[in-house]
Amino acid sequence: MTRSTISINPTKTDHHVAKLTALAIALHVLEAVFPSPLPGVKPGVANIITLFVLIRYGFGTAAWVSLLRVFASSLLLGNFLSPTFVLSLSGALLSLATLWLAQYLPKRYFSVITLSVLAAFAHTLGQLCIVRIWLIPHAGVSYLIPIFALAALIFGLINGIICARLLSK
Amino acid sequence: MNKLKSQALIGDIFIIVTSAIAVVFLFKTLWSNVPASQLLIRQADQIIGTYDLEQTRELHIHGPLGESHISIEQGKVRFKQSPCNHQYCVHQGWLNRVGQVAICLPNQISLQLIGEKKPYDSLNY
């Protein structure tokens, strides 16, 4: 009987994805430790990495980093398949969809700050949909929408500026 | 600050201003503090009736699951009892402001609070 060996030859892209995902996971987990004034209002600093990757390596890599981050962080934090995970995933998916469209905006007029703000709103929207449909199925949720939208604008802007700084280095 | 200016492009400013306006608009529409004066009750696709909020009254509305008890009490209203499983409608408690809604999906009953004039949720021409 011959021994079969499986060898994986990681490409250069794989290494990039792994390194950047590790960084994103670290930021995500770090952020989860800090208390938040309202459940769901979080700076989302890990998204800086997603944006950075999107600009430097393209959309495909950014999607990998973002989704791997959501799955790996949930395993680390112990909330895989829990509502927190589903919220995280729905936010990530909708913000990726938005980024996929927004990347075609003319670069001359729209920088990563626009991408960050739009992604933040999409993230919040994705989460609110899940909250409304699944977790709190009544119209009372609408009272929280303005707060979440304000948080998305502020944090989206700050993250975008940080990402622009990182990219200019 | 100069550095920041050189990073934010004209499109960015446009997106930021537009979203800021959208946020202000959301606060204005969803956080109305106008006390309601009337209550509109719907059952499935029919309007059961419009009731004055300035009274004390118990209503019994029939839905597919049975009877829901709605109580109006001097300017506020709530689902007092409902035959649904989750009791979301009951837990929502008292409603008293224009635009507030309580819905009992299983029993297909909704309460909507309106003012003297119903605030528009959309405009058609």
Image: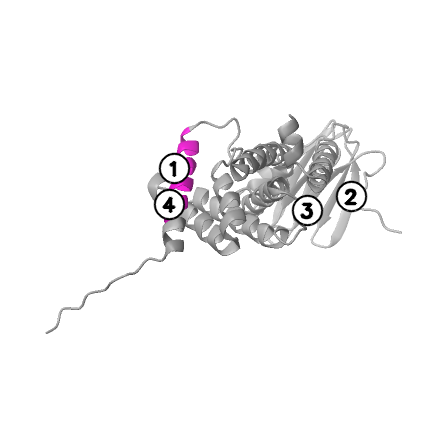
Disc 4, disc 3: CB below 8 Å? Answer: no
Q: CA distance from mark 1 to mark 2?
A: 43 Å
Q: Which sits earlier in the primary sequence, circle 4 or circle 1? A: 4
Element under disc 4: helix
Where is residue A11, by image quadrant? bottom left
Disc 2, disc 3: CB below 8 Å? Answer: no
Q: Residues within 10 Å of mark 1 (few under 14, many from 20)?
A: some
Q: Are marks 2 and 3 on the same chain?
A: no
Task: Report the residue that reaches farthest toward the bottom.
Answer: A1
Element under disc 2: loop
Question: Which circle, 4 or 2, is nearer the viewer?
Answer: 4
Q: Is residue A7 magenta?
A: no
Residue at (42, 46) in percent of width and height? A69
Numbered badge on residue B121: 2
Q: Main secondary structure of the magenta part?
A: helix
Residue pointed to by mark 4: A19
Q: Residue B20: x, y in percent?
A: 70, 34
Q: Chain of mark 1?
A: A
Residue pointed to by mark 3: A108
Q: CA distance from mark 4 to mark 2?
A: 48 Å
Residue at (13, 69) in percent of width and height? A3
Question: Which circle, 2 or 3, is nearer the viewer?
Answer: 3
Where is residue A25, by image quadrant? top left
Q: Which sits earlier in the primary sequence, circle 4 or circle 3? A: 4
Amino acid under disc 2: Asp
Element under disc 3: loop
Q: Is residue A22 magenta?
A: yes
Q: CA distance from mark 4 to mark 3?
A: 30 Å
Q: Chain of mark 2?
A: B
Disc 1, disc 3: CB below 8 Å? Answer: no
Residue pointed to by mark 1: A26
